[in-house]
Amino acid sequence: MKCHFCSGEMKKGKTTYTLNRSGYHLLINDVPAWICSQCNEAYFEENAVDNIQLIIKSLDNQVNRVREADLEGRSLSTKGVKQKVIRMIEALPEEVTIDDIMAELYFMKQVDTGLNELDDGKGIPHEEVEKRIVGRCKGYGNN
């Protein structure tokens, strides 16, 4: 197999898939791909592309839910939770599994909990989060 860009030899390997989108940045390490030995262009196989597209669609839905959060009555314990869950499930792809639904529901609950904590003044400044992350990374031997 030859690279479409430089005609270099393609070899099986793993690469990082990155996507910078309005609202989030996605990075998936160790994605199986055909990689050009000359220019490093990567070609993903159909099943990897399908899985990446499912991830992107799910992230798009999650980001939109965060953006559209009702600022007055976000709590999942309030009236309307059934409709929120129904809308969440309807936004998922047809080939969704029960595990996917549970993961989405867990994400929805965690976002809701975090937003309510912010409303209650329990948030911490972004700079403090950065300090904590850097501190933890140093503890793992990273700089």
Image: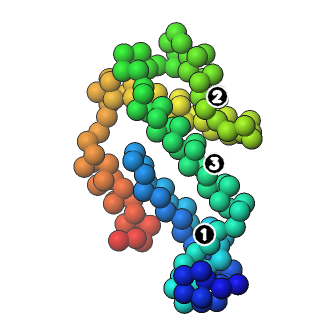
Q: Secondary structure at mark 2?
A: helix
102 to 85, vertically: above or below: below
Give the residue drawn at x 26%, y 42%: 125
40 to 106, vertically: above or below: below
Q: Quadrant of the C terminus?
A: bottom left
Residue, far top = 79
The kind of residue tagged 1 is: Asp
Crowdedness near tag 2: few (<14), some (14–19) or many (≥20) residues, C-alpha within 10 Å: few
The kind of residue tagged 2 is: Glu
Q: Secondary structure at mark 3?
A: helix
Q: Quadrant of residue 100?
A: top right
Query: Contact, CB < 8 Å: mark 1 with mark 3?
Result: no
Q: Which residue is mark 2?
A: 90
Q: Position of residue 46 (x, y in %)?
A: 71, 62
- The residues bearing labels 3 and 2 have C-alpha atoms spaced at a distance of 14 Å
Q: Position of residue 111 (x, y in %)?
A: 46, 33
Q: Nearer the viewer, residue 38 or 79?
A: 38
26 to 93, vertically: above or below: below
Query: Contact, CB < 8 Å: mark 1 with mark 2?
Result: no
Q: How many numbered discs sit on the rendered protein?
A: 3
Q: Secondary structure at mark 1?
A: strand
* Sequence-first disc among 3 and 2: 3
Residue 40 appears in the picture as rendered:
yes
Give the residue drawn at x 74%, y 41%: 95
Q: Position of residue 113 (x, y in %)?
A: 45, 28
Marks 1 and 2: which is nearer the front? 2
* Sequence-first disc among 1 and 3: 1
Q: Which residue is mark 1?
A: 30
The kind of residue tagged 3 is: Leu
- Horizontal side of 30 relative to 24 (left or right) equals right
Which numbered marker is on residue 54?
A: 3
Give the residue drawn at x 64%, y 35%: 92
